[in-house]
């Protein structure tokens, strides 16, 4: 989290039923709308991303509703569990691990629903557990005119690429403060289409704290129903200002460049990417653990001896992959340092990697990338590097 964002949290607190908070909410919503690609309401909940997902599922579906889910990993499966918790009958469309949802298969599945009995579709934009990104434009096209409410978990995707909620006719899109926006955790953002907002207000739903009908009523007064995490809202507002000051396209480009540099480094080291071509995420790179690698020991060594925090696999993928995030206040220098440390850690486990090959491959991506950036006159990453170096961690 950037210093400017952390500093915003130290502002004196304000009355959450007063005009300053109302202006803060307006500022956050106005800054989020172009990122989500909607002019509609975006509600702020005092919660992590999961609360936002639960609010959408509980507000849009009723017990007994038939819902089609297309999970591509642990977080997609969590949406399935959530919908079942609220009494939905969930049909699961399976996808092989590491792959994105097949748009054609989704279209065919929905075409077979001639009675239009499917009330909801649950999708994950970016699956953090496998480093897989779904192409939401293609999936939206596959859904076409089907009337089901579409809920999209974009917790680790929103802000990392072009997103057009309104154009793609998505009904509920959810993200969280601690991912691409690089603010501290504690705020979930839930954007609703007009028809979803209407339903959330009209229906009696079995959820109280995360009731989006209440969120809508209070948003109209410039408030949240319950006491909000004001300091985290200050931070989110500052993080969004920084996002827009940099420019969305630059942020997308930066994340894509970090992710491709990491993938190039992995390939040069003889490591295999877990996500399949065409399904790569810009925000998380998942790498298969080669035979003989103790992932837990790799992560421990990097964390304790080198101050670098990577993640392992979740559930069935524990021990089988490790994951590298690109989100946050991270510079090219951080990426290069991490890759250097990773090579050393692999050597320590006696894995035969060609020394320097990963770092060199990443450097090549950055060098080619910077030339491209200079070509279109966009800013370089220099500023981020300077900021990072000025703040020893
Ligand atoms: N969905 C995805 C894709 C995620 O990456 C995460 C968290 O990493 C969540 C949902 C859950 O979000 P939270 O931990 O903020 O509740």
Image (tube, grey):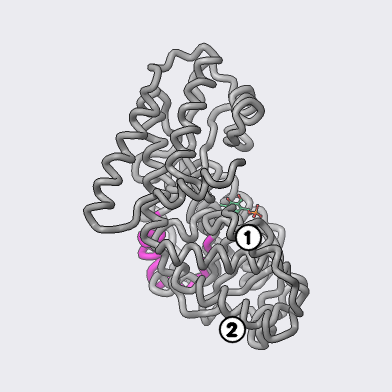
Which mark, by number, is residue 198? 2
Q: Residues within 10 Å of mark 1 (few under 14, many from 20)?
A: some
Specify which label sits upstream in the sequence, 2 or 1.
Answer: 1
Q: Residues within 10 Å of mark 2 (few under 14, many from 20)?
A: some
**Residues under numbered marks 2 and 1 in contact, where contact means CB atoms less than 8 Å apart:** no
Nearer to us of marks 2 and 1 is 2
| Viewer-proximal residue among 275 and 331 | 331
Residue that badge 1 annotates: 89
Q: Position of residue 68 (x, y in %)?
A: 53, 59
- Residue extending farthest front: 390
Q: Is residue 191 among what the camera can see?
A: yes
Q: Position of residue 123 (x, y in %)?
A: 51, 58
Tell me how far mark 2 sits from mark 1, CA to CA. 23 Å
Left or right: 203 as drawn, with respect to 351: right
Q: Residue at x 49, y 55 (%)?
A: 157
Q: State yes or no: residue 341 in magenta.
A: no
| Viewer-proximal residue among 374 and 159 | 374
Q: Residue at x 44, y 56 (%)?
A: 160
What secondary structure is found at the residue carrying circle 2? helix
| Magenta span of residues | 135-152
């Amino acid at each position: 989290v950037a210093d400017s964002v952390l500093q915003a949290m130290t502002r004196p607190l304000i009355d959450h039923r007063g005009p300053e908070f109302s202006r803060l909410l307006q500022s956050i919503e106005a800054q989020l709308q172009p990122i989500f690609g909607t002019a509609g309401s975006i509600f702020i909940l005092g919660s992590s991303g999961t609360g936002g997902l639960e609010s959408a599922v509980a507000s849009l579906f009723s017990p007994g509703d038939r819902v089609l889910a297309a999970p591509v990993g642990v977080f997609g499966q969590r949406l399935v569990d959530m919908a079942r918790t609220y009494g939905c009958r969930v049909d699961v469309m399976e996808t092989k691990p590491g792959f994105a949802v097949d748009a054609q298969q989704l279209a065919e599945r929905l075409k077979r629903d001639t009675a239009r009995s499917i009330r909801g579709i649950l999708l994950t934009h970016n699956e953090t557990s496998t480093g897989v990104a779904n192409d939401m434009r293609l999936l939206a096209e596959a859904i076409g005119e089907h009337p089901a409410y579409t809920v999209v978990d974009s917790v680790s995707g929103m802000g990392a690429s072009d997103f057009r909620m309104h154009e793609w006719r998505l009904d509920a899109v959810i993200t969280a403060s601690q991912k691409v926006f690089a603010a501290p955790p504690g705020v979930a953002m839930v954007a609703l289409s007009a028809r979803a907002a209407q339903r959330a207000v009209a229906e009696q739903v079995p959820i109280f704290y995360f009731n989006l009908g209440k969120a809508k009523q209070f948003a109209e007064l410039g408030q949240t129903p319950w006491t909000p995490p004001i300091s985290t809202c200050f931070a989110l507002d500052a993080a969004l200002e920084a996002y827009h000051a940099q420019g969305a396209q630059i942020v997308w480009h930066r994340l894509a460049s970090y992710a491709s540099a990491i993938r190039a480094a992995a390939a040069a080291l003889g490591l295999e990417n877990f996500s399949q071509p065409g399904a790569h995420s810009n925000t998380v790179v998942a790498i298969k653990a080669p035979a003989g690698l103790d992932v837990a020991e790799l992560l421990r060594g990097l964390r304790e001896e080198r101050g670098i925090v990577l993640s392992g696999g979740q559930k069935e993928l524990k021990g089988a992959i490790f994951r590298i995030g690109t989100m946050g206040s991270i510079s090219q220098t951080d990426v290069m340092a991490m890759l250097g440390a990773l090579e050393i850690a692999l050597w320590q486990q006696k894995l035969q990697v060609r020394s320097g090959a990963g770092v060199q491959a990443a450097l090549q991506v950055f060098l080619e990338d910077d030339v491209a950036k200079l070509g279109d006159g966009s800013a370089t990453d220099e500023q981020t590097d300077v900021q990072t170096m000025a703040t020893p961690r």
